[in-house]
Image (cartoon, grey):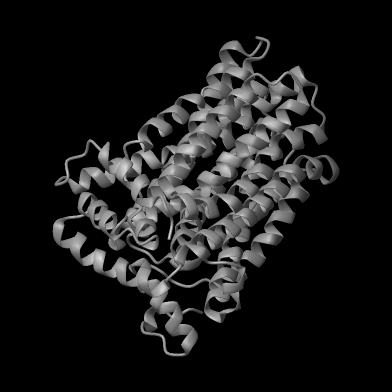
Amino acid sequence: MKSTPDQHASHGLQHATIPPGNHRRALRTATIIATLGGLLFGYDTGVINGALPYMQEDLGLTPLTEGLVTSSLLFGAAFGALFGGRLADRHGRRLMLMGLAVIFLAGTLACTFSPNTGVMVAARFVLGLAVGGASVTVPVYLAEVAPGNRRGRIVTRNELMIVTGQLLAFTFNACLGNSFGGSHGIWRWMLVIATLPAIALWIGMNFMPESPRWLASTGSFGETLRVLQRIRSQEEAAREFEEVKAMALEDGKSTMGSWKDLGIPWLRRIFFVGLGLAVIQQITGVNSIMYYGTQILSTSGFGREAALTANIANGTISVLATFVGIWLLGKVGRRRMLITGQIGTTTTLLLIGLFSLILPEGPDRGFAILALTVTFLAFQQGAISPVTWLMLSEIFPLKIRGLGMGASAFLLWTVNFLVGFGFPQLLAVIGISNTFFVFAGLGIGAIGFAAKYVPETKDKSLEDLEHYFKNVAAGHPTDAAAKVP
């Protein structure tokens, strides 16, 4: 038991301005405020796309230091994700998000005023800690406050906010670059905009309730019921409270899960699936486009400012595809969406490699590559990314949720770091076509993993999923339709 959960939860409830009876508005407000963390995640990872060409001039970047500036945030995000889950288990989801807002603000200001490459790399590492922490904490918070029948659509709104943040970054980059591209230090203005949502996140989370499932895991059942009564109808709150309480009592010291728990076969299998989901989401090479899209388009035949403008198409299709993905999650199984997305991205990567190889450099090749990157992102952001973050937030049982989500996100960001750091090196050594052939080869392996190991989790409460995986491990699954492959 913790000494402070009632104090933390009471603070959030005491200051809440949402009428107790308006549970739908309360849930919607909590979703919007929490996903500001996703907006920051998206903006801070996307802004480098357009800022980097101007940094190259002001900071004198080489291909090596260009990779370091880009990937230092991703390296920090790996550690932010690894420790963020454990800290959220210890101190609560709400307090963790407030702390991350402060780190977002401090990291953004440090990046904005960086005088040289060394300071920039260190500042982006700090900013990465916040990005990684948010990538773990926001989906878990949303999954734990959402009702089972709406969890998919609520959790994937974080993915929508991530791609919205990237679109805003691309748009601001293009506006500032085309209007003031000749001004010294214009990239600093691109970066500093992220301070606004960081401040809004900190203020907003002061008024939000704590996760009811985290409260139950600490034994604060009175606060658990009060939070549920704010975000559910009275009947739903009473019914869900009994489920949450029973599972918390069954798990015992649920938030104290450790690596030793992976000695249990069913927990070890889920942990393995979580790590695999993290890897296959990144080896598509999506972030080579999200971080270096402007350079890819410039290499393909666009000028610098024209590439900035054209890159907005990548952000726009990401947002539109995520809307479609959220809608599909209510209609189609997670597993089918994931496999379809992997097939689509792998095929598109092959085509990018082929077109880069056979078309001469110029506007025609530039528009062809732009069309293919847009198609790639439609599959990635419409299927793979929303399903990945949703499944990572829901497959782990409460006992190891922070540990499992943190470890999976750590691996996800580590692979992301390798892609971000290695892409400019690959581009310089083997060229754009061979680089995308490499990603296509990795995509074939991702399809195989998803088909063999990824389970179906649609339309099940978090408690149902935990019981189900235990039953599968015991050899008598209770739901044949959702049988783990």
Q: Nearer the viewer, residue 187 or 310?
A: 187
Q: Residue furthest top?
A: 183
Residue at the image position 46 percent from the left and 41 percent from the top: 97
Residue 395 visible to an observer of this rendering: no
Residue at the image position 41 percent from the left and 41 percent from the top: 35
Relative to 217, 353 lies left or right: right
Instruction: State whether residue 475 is above or below residue 276.
Output: below
Residue at the image position 44 percent from the left and 27 percent from the top: 199
Instruction: State whether residue 12 is above or below residue 307.
Output: below
Instruction: State whether residue 225 is above or below residue 295.
Output: below
- Image quadrant holding the N terminus, namely bottom left
Q: Residue furthest front?
A: 3
Q: Residue furthest right?
A: 429
Choose top left, top right, bottom left or bottom right for residue 72. Answer: top right
Q: Position of residue 269 (x, y in %)?
A: 56, 75
Residue 352 visible to an observer of this rendering: yes
Q: Position of residue 113 (x, y in %)?
A: 65, 18
How many numbered discs sit on the rendered protein?
0
Residue at the image position 39 percent from the left and 42 percent from the top: 34
Q: Position of residue 309 (x, y in %)?
A: 56, 25
Q: Position of residue 287 (x, y in %)?
A: 63, 44
Q: Nearer the viewer, residue 254 or 339?
A: 254
